[in-house]
Image: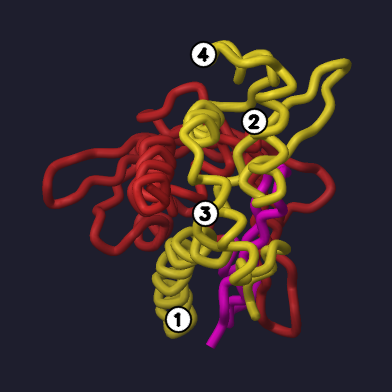
Amino acid sequence: MHNQWVINQPTADHLSAIFGALADPTRRAILERLALGEATVGDLGAPFSMSQPAISKHLKVLERAGLVSRRRRGTANISRLEPAALHGANDWLERYRAAWEERFERLDEVLDELQRQP
Amino acid sequence: MATTRVTAPPGMPFAEVEREFDAPRDLVYRAWTDPGLIVRWLGPRRLQMRIDYWNLDARGGSYRYIHSGEDGVEHAFHGSFHRTTADPYTLLQTFEYEGAPGFVSLDEVRLVEAGGKTIAKLRTVHQTVEARDAMIEAGMSEGMDDGFDKLDELLASELAAAR
């Protein structure tokens, strides 16, 4: 409720799309490459002896699962990893939120003490 | 009980954090800018924080601080303070973890008065969406150096589970 992440928790259907997408070794290699940073279809195809349409087909499966997003830069399509989809957006943000919350609780203590001082 | 709210829109290179404090704005501002007070809260409890330098005046300044654990491992951070003329209760600074040099974020803290309480609104803008995702992935608690390692580990475990 306090988490404003705009992607919803994965549904069962969405999870099966994710696992379906992960079931293929080429798609896993594409994800591993994207974990290093954004890439074009050409970049992604380079390590495989595969045509660009074949790579694009794999990318579409990954996109449907929410694991990868695509945007245009000039004439090129740039793909990027969406790590949140891998384990649910709430979990993804929770540790970050908890780290801030721990600091803020310490700050509460400092502020309490300052206010008690004459 | 005040809650910490976090916003991190997909595909955008920033993250926002919001939290209310039961104290007047001047006091929160002091706790946020006085190095003697900062060391008491800006970090996980299990780490000691010490200030290397902290120079902040009306024109801006610079800072460097170090978190160290019982294991002796140290994490150092540094950056520049900038002043905004629009609002004296807005802090603007760059932030760089020395374990990941070159990954610099721009951090803004706005302190908003709310009926004797203060709402702190933080916004961290990273150079890339990947840098933001890696920082969130690391959860800040272990430093940012292993952000990409954690992403790799996560991918590896998800991939192993799918096999």
* Chain A tint in image: yellow
Please tell me the numbered disc located at residue A112.
1
Q: Circle 4 sits in a helix, a strand or a loop, which is it?
A: loop
Do the residues at discs 4 and 1 belong to one chain? yes
Marks 1/3 in contact by CB < 8 Å: the verdict is no
Residue for point 45% across, 67% down: A98
Residue for point 61% across, 46% down: A67
Residue A56 picture quarter = top right
> Which chain is disc 2 placed on?
B
Residue for point 52% across, 54% down: A19
Please tell me how crowded label 4 is: few (under 14), some (14-19), or many (20+) other residues with Cα within 10 Å. few
Q: Measure the alpha-carbon separation of dots 3 and 4.
A: 23 Å
Picture mark count: 4
Q: Amino acid at mark 1?
A: Asp
Do the residues at discs 1 and 3 belong to one chain? yes
Is any atom of residue B144 visible in this view?
no
Residue A61 part of the magenta segment: no
Mark 1 or 3: in front is 3
Q: Measure the alpha-carbon separation of dots 2 and 4.
A: 28 Å
Please tell me how crowded label 3 is: few (under 14), some (14-19), or many (20+) other residues with Cα within 10 Å. some
Mark 4 or 1: in front is 4
Q: Measure the alpha-carbon separation of dots 2 and 3.
A: 31 Å
Residue carrying label 3: A19
Residue carrying label 2: B127
Q: Amino acid at mark 2?
A: Gln
Q: Circle 2 sits in a helix, a strand or a loop, which is it?
A: loop
Marks 1/2 in contact by CB < 8 Å: the verdict is no
Please tell me the numbered disc located at residue A47.
4
- The stretch in magenta equals B1-29
